[in-house]
């Protein structure tokens, strides 16, 4: 098979959560262990860092990868979902996995996979682990796909586990309370492996403390205890962080959520310094060049300045809360919001907090899970949100650009897949 035929085969033969949602989710670790055995346990050939949590996993993973890359380590990075290209999921020092490896890996294991019938994520996790082993990486940052306890990435024994935060998302699979979700996320805590918790309070914090105790020896650190401050430099599109160890640390990522992510990463680095040589200048370089080093997209990504156009993949109540706060503090004459969601999210909770003083362009991504734009517009109207609906991101985005004046602001988001469709338009020059 060619590369294109191989990708089409992967999408069609294995259930893909990105497209079909919970029907693609396979509970349990049996397939993961069988695939791991088939591939001769590739993740044991290099050090790993495991990153879970509800929001901020991607930014945290990319920041750590960027810093370790700056420090001279050959660094693997496994994240999901992808935006434009399947190969975005699997990178080494920012470079996507080769097409040849994807083709050869599927060809070599096709008969085994057809007998096993793994999910798309189970299959691609095995591919990532095998690729990192073949390329002899020094370390790989592994982002949890969903939950933690039963996630197929949980076959690894990392040098550090990180749980960024807990918010209500995937409640049909992980539980409908923060503590229930925390128990699933806490499943990546392992005996003897230190864990950093980015943000946790009350009963959620107790869940992590109890899990640490039941898993035996191992350090647990809560990143919110880090002393420091964050400030924006006269309206610039980046942040500066001040801590005793890293004064005026400039972060290339500009979203409000990056304050918590930065604290989590800096806390993690103090533990990782026992395993890796990480001089201060590599931390500055990693924060300041994370996009170029890793290819990260869709995190408060500014793609145009007049009018200002920002894309952000925040897609649940936790992520959208930060985005709304940032939108309300931004400077503009009119706010235009191109917005769509998938049909398995808590839509009402999100609509309830969106800015009312905005012009909305309700739309839907080009995936089966997309919530119908007309239904979204009707539901949004009950919360006082006014605007038209469009059956494609292209129509909605072009309408917003046509209506916006030079000093206006266009925000595109609500779903990773809305951002993906918008990025594709920009790539085409639309």
Image (tube, rainbow, N blue to C red):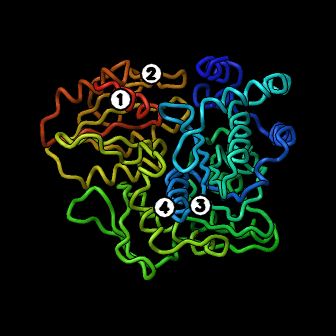
Viewer-nearest of discs 1 and 3: 3
Q: Position of residue 353 (x, y in %)?
A: 37, 46
Query: Badge 1 is on which residue?
Result: 427
Query: Badge 2 is on which residue?
Result: 372
Q: Is residue 223 above or below residue 257?
A: below
Question: Sequence order check: which comes first, mark 1 or mark 3?
Answer: 3
Residue 239 lies in quadrant: bottom left
Residue 203 lies in quadrant: bottom right
Neighbourhood count class around disc 3 (C-alpha, 10 Å): few under 14, some 14–19, many 20 upward: some
Between 232 and 357, the residue placed more toward the observer is: 232
Viewer-nearest of discs 1 and 2: 1
Question: Sequence order check: which comes first, mark 3 or mark 2?
Answer: 3
Tell me if 251 is positioned left or right of 330 in this view.
right
Query: Badge 3 is on which residue?
Result: 73
Between 253 and 99, the residue placed more toward the observer is: 99
Query: Badge 4 is on which residue?
Result: 261
Tell me if 287 is positioned left or right of 396 in this view.
right
Q: Residue furthest bottom?
A: 244
* Residue drawn at 46 percent across, 65 percent down: 262
Question: Sequence order check: which comes first, mark 4 or mark 1?
Answer: 4
The quadrant of the picture occupied by the N terminus is: top right
SS for dot 3: loop
Q: Is residue 131 above or below residue 16?
A: below
């Amino acid at each position: 098979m060619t590369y294109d035929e191989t990708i089409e085969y992967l999408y069609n033969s294995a259930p893909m959560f990105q497209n079909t949602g919970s029907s693609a989710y396979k509970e349990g670790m049996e397939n993961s262990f069988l695939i791991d055995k088939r591939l001769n346990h590739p993740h044991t050939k290099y050090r790993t860092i495991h990153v879970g949590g509800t929001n901020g996993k991607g930014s945290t993973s990319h920041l750590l990868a960027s810093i370790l890359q700056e420090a001279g380590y050959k660094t693997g990075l496994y994240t999901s979902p992808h935006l434009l290209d399947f190969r975005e999921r699997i990178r080494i020092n920012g470079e996507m996995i080769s097409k040849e490896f994807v083709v050869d890996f599927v060809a070599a294991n096709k008969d085994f996979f057809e007998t096993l019938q793994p999910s798309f994520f189970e299959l691609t996790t095995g591919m990532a682990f095998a690729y990192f082993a073949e390329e002899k990486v020094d370390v790989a940052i592994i982002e949890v796909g969903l939950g933690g306890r039963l996630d197929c990435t949980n076959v690894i024994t990392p040098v550090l586990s990180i749980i960024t935060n807990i918010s209500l998302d995937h409640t049909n699979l992980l539980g409908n309370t923060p503590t229930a979700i925390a128990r699933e996320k806490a499943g990546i805590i392992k005996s003897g492996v230190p864990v950093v918790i980015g943000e946790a309070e009350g009963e959620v914090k107790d869940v992590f403390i109890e899990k640490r105790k039941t898993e035996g020896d191992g350090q647990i650190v809560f990143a919110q205890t880090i002393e420091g401050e964050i400030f924006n430099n006269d309206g610039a599109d980046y942040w500066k962080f001040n801590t005793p160890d890293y004064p005026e640390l400039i972060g290339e990522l500009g979203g409000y959520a990056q304050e918590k992510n930065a604290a989590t990463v800096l806390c993690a680095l103090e533990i990782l310094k026992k395993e890796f040589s990480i001089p201060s200048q590599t931390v500055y370089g990693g924060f300041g060049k994370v996009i170029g080093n890793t290819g990260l997209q869709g995190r408060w990504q500014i793609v145009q300045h007049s009018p200002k156009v920002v894309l952000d993949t925040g897609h649940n109540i936790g992520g959208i809360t930060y985005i709304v706060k940032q939108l309300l503090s931004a400077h503009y004459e009119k706010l235009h919001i191109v917005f769509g969601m998938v049909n398995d999210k808590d839509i009402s909770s999100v609509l309830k907090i969106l800015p009312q003083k905005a012009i909305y362009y309700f739309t839907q991504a080009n995936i089966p899970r997309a919530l119908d734009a007309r239904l979204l517009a009707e539901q949004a109207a009950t919360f006082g949100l006014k605007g038209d609906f469009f059956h494609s991101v292209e129509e909605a985005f072009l309408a917003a650009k046509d209506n916006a004046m030079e000093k206006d602001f266009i925000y595109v988001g609500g779903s990773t897949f809305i951002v993906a469709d918008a990025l594709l338009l920009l790539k085409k020059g639309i």
